[in-house]
Amino acid sequence: MTADKAAPASGSILVVGGGISGLTTAIEAAEVGYEVFLVEKNPYLGGRVAQLNQYFPKLCPPSCGLEINFRRIKDNPKIKVLTLAEVEKISGTPGNYDADIRISPRYVNENCTCCGECAAACQAEVSSDFNFGMNKIKGAYLPNDLSLPARFVLSPQIIGTEDAKRCKEACKYDAVDLDMAAKTISLKVGAVVWATGWTPYDAGKIDNLGFGRYPNIITNMMLERLASTNGPTSGKITRPSDQKAPESIAFVQCAGSRDENHLPYCSYICCMASLKHATYIREQYPDAKIFIFYIDLRTPGYRYEKFYENIKADKNVFFIKGKVAEVSEDPSSRNVTVVAENAVTGEKIRQTVDLVVLATGMQPTTALAKHPADLTYNEDGFIVNDFVKGGMFAAGCANKPADVVSSNQNATGMALKAIQTLVRR
């Protein structure tokens, strides 16, 4: 194929998922001239990265990576963003796909100025999914500080109630539209990139680790939200039962990962996430004791290995090679005791701490619900890329467990693969 013979088969690319992989794919494709439809099921872009306090390799806040990408999206007319949107059906062949997209109502239109009067008028509260249910928010809310679109949302739970009427009456800009309804639109695209990301493995399924039974056992992503200034405790890490500052914390690695009863694979990020969390704890509590129970510590690459060496030098961080077998709670103090066998010495260890953090694994969203398209999955639910067939590709954690940097790199490659599909041979 020569450059003078290349011609676009269809100039549009559908990117499904507005997390860091989807953003990267959309921007890379649009900035070389292709029309991109970016579809996200949440009312905001940013995905899991938006929920983090900091991310590797530089321990940046989410704004570090998201703000510049949001600016590039807003400045590029080639990118059409559809939030609260999900793919209902995709049919066709590479270069010629028909996609049906269902868009759920936001109940707030483009007139919104984010003044917050609707939230002030709303009396009802709903559980915060963004904070993993650790607090409640108003039924009219701005999803997060970085929200794109920068527009409030009305929870479906208040539609049809007096609260919804209060929100509409409080809005000076006629932005609250209670008559909004779900709709389905059809798109013609030449290629599809699935960047549907991951979800934390359900820790409640791991019977021996006590999540859901004991309040002072939380997950690694819950700790991210506790450490975030826009989280449920405004960035103060406290234990849920009594908001006490924890003096001792146990991290339980491979909570559901590398386990034939749960996720048989290594989730790649969990070890580094717990080492990062140790820095969160240390910053707020200089004298806290930190116990990390692990099977193997995986710190891929020179930079991550150096990070591990720095944490290991902390005299109040203790690494115990041993899988936690059980946990129990003292009902009076609500402290938790973890029990493990030291794989090096054979000694049975019982360690009582104020707070336990489960390093739950990374599960692709496709393990829970398959996409309505002709895709191939492996036994763990990750999408397998068929580069021979082409047309549809998986980027980032839809394809395999990965950190932010690796997801970005992979997404750039998938943008190129999508573009190649649009060029007739």
Image (cartoon, rainbow, N blue to C red):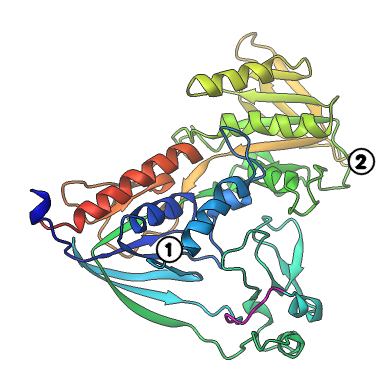
Indicate the quadrant where residue 338 lies: top right
Q: Which numbered dot is residue 358? A: none
Mark 1 crowdedness (10 Å alpha carbons): few <14, some 14-19, many ≥20: some
Rendering coords of residue 369 (x, y %): 42, 59
Q: Nearer the viewer, residue 15 or 425?
A: 425
Residue on which disc 1 sits: 76
Place of residue 109 in the rendered image (x, y in percent of width and height, measured from the top left): 58, 82
Say which amino acid is labelled 1.
Answer: Asn
Q: Visible in this render: residue 242?
A: yes
Q: Within the magenta stretch, is there residue 138?
A: no
Q: In which quadrant is the C terminus drawn?
A: bottom left
- Amino acid bearing label 2: Ser
- Is residue 156 toward the left or the right of residue 84 in the image? right
Magenta segment, which residues? 109-114
Under circle 1, the secondary element is loop
Tally of marks: 2
Measured in 3D between alpha carbons, the distance from the residue under mark 1 to the one under mark 2, in whole angstroms, is 58 Å
Pick the front one: 20 or 360: 20
Q: Residue furthest top?
A: 345
Residue in the image at 43% along x and 54% along y: 22
Q: Position of residue 294 (x, y in %)?
A: 60, 24
Q: Is residue 216 above or below residue 44?
A: above
Where disc 2 sits, the SS reads loop
Name the residue tied to disc 2: 332
Q: Main secondary structure of the magenta part?
A: loop
Q: Residue at x 58, y 18 (%)?
A: 306
Of residue 238 and residue 295, the one placed in the foreground of this image is 238
The spot of residue 170 in percent (x, y) is 77, 86
Image position of 114 with respect to 295: above or below: below
